[in-house]
């Protein structure tokens, strides 16, 4: 069986540095974590990643049930941080409501904060929603006195890499994620 190797960057930021809170565009709002929004996080994650390279790297992101399972696993981690876990919504009525972005944060051993996933639904990209979600999550990490925050990103996702660099994240390590060809559908 053949495998595909995806290059990924581990990136880290000093979250203790003073930061300017990015303002959401008009009509958008943050929705804090509560148990009732777990499935909304999963659906927003699915809509954000299903057609992206990360759905090849992590096949669970390419299907709704996989995203639901992933969200339950993140929620059940001992270091899950509700204050670093957010949604972005657009619209003010039930008929106009759209879930546009999601981010989850956990505390790892050694006092490191880890952003698990950040996803913006196509159609809402390019509005700085990712910047706003990251800044909101970093504020949540600071509430728990977590100064170092890390994430991983697929190297080919240049738009995300540029965003993280612009926000002060620096590459600390390069790793390779091995995915069986059968899982990706990619023929080497």
Image: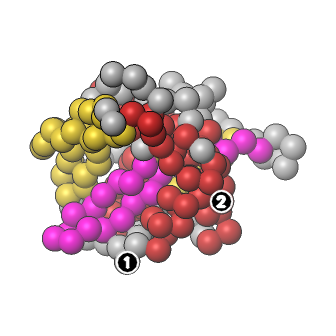
Residue 17, x across and y down, in percent? 20, 52
Residue 75, x across and y down, in percent? 49, 69
Quadrant assignment for the N terminus: top left
Q: Mark 2 points at which residue?
A: 39
The outermost residue toward the front is 1
Q: Give the range drawn in magenta.
A: 97-117
Q: In the image, is residue 182 above or below residue 83?
A: above
Mark 2: give few (<14), some (14-19) or many (20+) Cα within 10 Å: some
The outermost residue toward the left is 172
The image's mark for residue 78 is 1
Q: How many marks?
A: 2
* Residue 41 in sight: no
Kindly indicate the quadrant of the structure image that contains residue 183.
Answer: top left
In this rendering, position of residue 53 left or right of residue 122: left
Quadrant assignment for the C terminus: top left
In this rendering, position of residue 185 left or right of residue 97: left
């Amino acid at each position: 069986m053949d495998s595909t190797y995806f290059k990924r960057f581990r990136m880290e930021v000093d979250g203790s540095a003073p930061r300017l809170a990015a303002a959401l565009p008009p009509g958008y709002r943050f929705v804090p974590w509560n148990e009732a929004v777990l499935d909304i996080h999963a659906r927003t994650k699915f809509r954000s990643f299903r057609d992206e390279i990360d759905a090849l790297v992590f096949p669970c992101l390419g299907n709704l049930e996989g995203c639901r399972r992933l969200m339950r696993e993140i929620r059940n981690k001992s270091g899950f941080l509700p204050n670093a876990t957010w949604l972005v919504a657009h619209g003010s009525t039930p008929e106009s409501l759209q879930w546009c972005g999601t981010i989850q944060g956990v505390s790892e051993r050694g006092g490191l904060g880890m952003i698990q996933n950040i996803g913006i639904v196509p159609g809402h990209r390019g509005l700085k929603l990712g910047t706003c979600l990251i800044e909101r999550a970093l504020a949540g990490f600071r509430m728990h006195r977590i100064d170092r925050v890390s994430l991983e990103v697929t190297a080919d996702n240049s738009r995300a890499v540029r965003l993280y660099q612009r926000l002060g994240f620096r590459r600390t390590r390069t790793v390779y994620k091995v995915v069986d060809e059968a899982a990706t559908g990619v023929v080497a």
